Amino acid sequence: MGTAEPVFHVLGFDFGHHPQILSLNPSFQRGARTLRLEVEVHWQPAAPREDLQRLQRALERFSPSLRAHQCRGPHAYRLFAETPGGQEPLEAPLALAHLLEHLFIDMVAFVSELPSVSGITGARRDATNRFDVFVECPLRSLARLVVGCGTAWMTALVAGAPLDGDPRALLELARLLYRHQPRELDAELAARLLRREPEAVRRDLRRLERERFASPVPYAMNFSGSPRYRLRWADGDSASEGPR
């Protein structure tokens, strides 16, 4: 895929209101909160268009609504565009940051089931490979999950490395937990609803806990010994808190 080295360097993360972006995308909902990721991208493959197409196809395996996105950027950067090579200039780092934005959008929309989620990727004037990615997101805990897992999955795909676990299954569990708020979700119940093995669900719940999306309920055990979790309501967290 062009390089085996890490390509994303997270420089900053925050969550809240960013009114300065409203004029950049007419689809942004006034008053909606957004995640902002400041990221440095080091990616210069020999054939960026072909590599981007392969990445998009790989993302479709666990992000099936990606192809339905309404991408309004320049044609060379639009998802699944069939632009012949060399017809339009393409900056590979910007294209990859833009693809990361759309992965974030799809993750937020899938977990929250919001009918519309918008985003934008902006280049920084102080560095040619540094970008600000903004995506509407209803909760800080979901923003952290999206940034943590989305960046890790994209990094693995670019490097041609195996993904850690099953992204689609993890997102389905996150959506179930999101639907369940503010109630507790029993791991055994989640396994039955999702038709998965209980141990696999427990493993993914621990992953959601590490990403600070889910919180275990202390001493909440039923007679089967099944742990319970609830969505981590993190609206009171410091805005300067970043993903680990």
Image (cartoon, grey):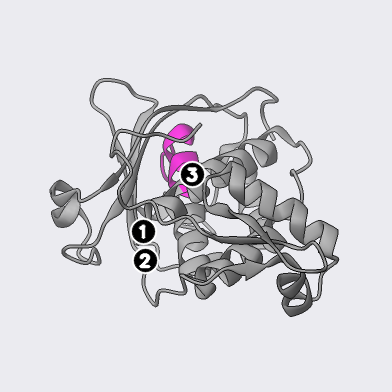
Q: Is residue 99 magenta?
A: yes
Write the residue at 46% across / 33% down: 93
Helix, strand or loop: magenta stretch: helix
- Identify the mark nearer the N-term, 2 or 1: 2
| Type of amino acid at the residue the image marks with label 3 | Val
Write the residue at 76% across / 61% down: 201
Q: In this view, does 221 lie above or below 7?
A: below
Q: For this rendering, which residue is in front, 144 or 229?
A: 229
Q: Do the residues labelled 2 and 1 touch (CB within 8 Å)?
A: yes
Tag 1's secondary structure?
Answer: loop
Q: To which residue does mark 1 refer?
A: 137
Residue 52 visible to the viewer: no
Q: For this rendering, which residue is in front, 236 or 50?
A: 236
Check disc 3: other Cα within 10 Å, few if <14, some if 14-19, many if 20+.
many
Q: Give the quarter of the image for residue 148.
A: top right
Tag 3's secondary structure?
Answer: helix
Left or right of 233? Residue 48 is right
| Type of amino acid at the residue the image marks with label 2 | Val
Left or right of 149? Residue 125 is left
Q: Give the quarter of the image for residue 214.
A: bottom right
Q: Give the quarter of the image for residue 2.
A: top right
Write the residue at 36% across / 58% down: 137
Q: Where is residue 136 in the image (x, y as percent from the top left)?
A: 33, 58
Q: To which residue does mark 2 refer?
A: 117
Write the residue at 35% across / 62% down: 138
Q: To which residue does mark 3 refer?
A: 147
Check disc 2: other Cα within 10 Å, few if <14, some if 14-19, many if 20+.
many
Q: Nearer the viewer, mark 3 or mark 2?
A: 3
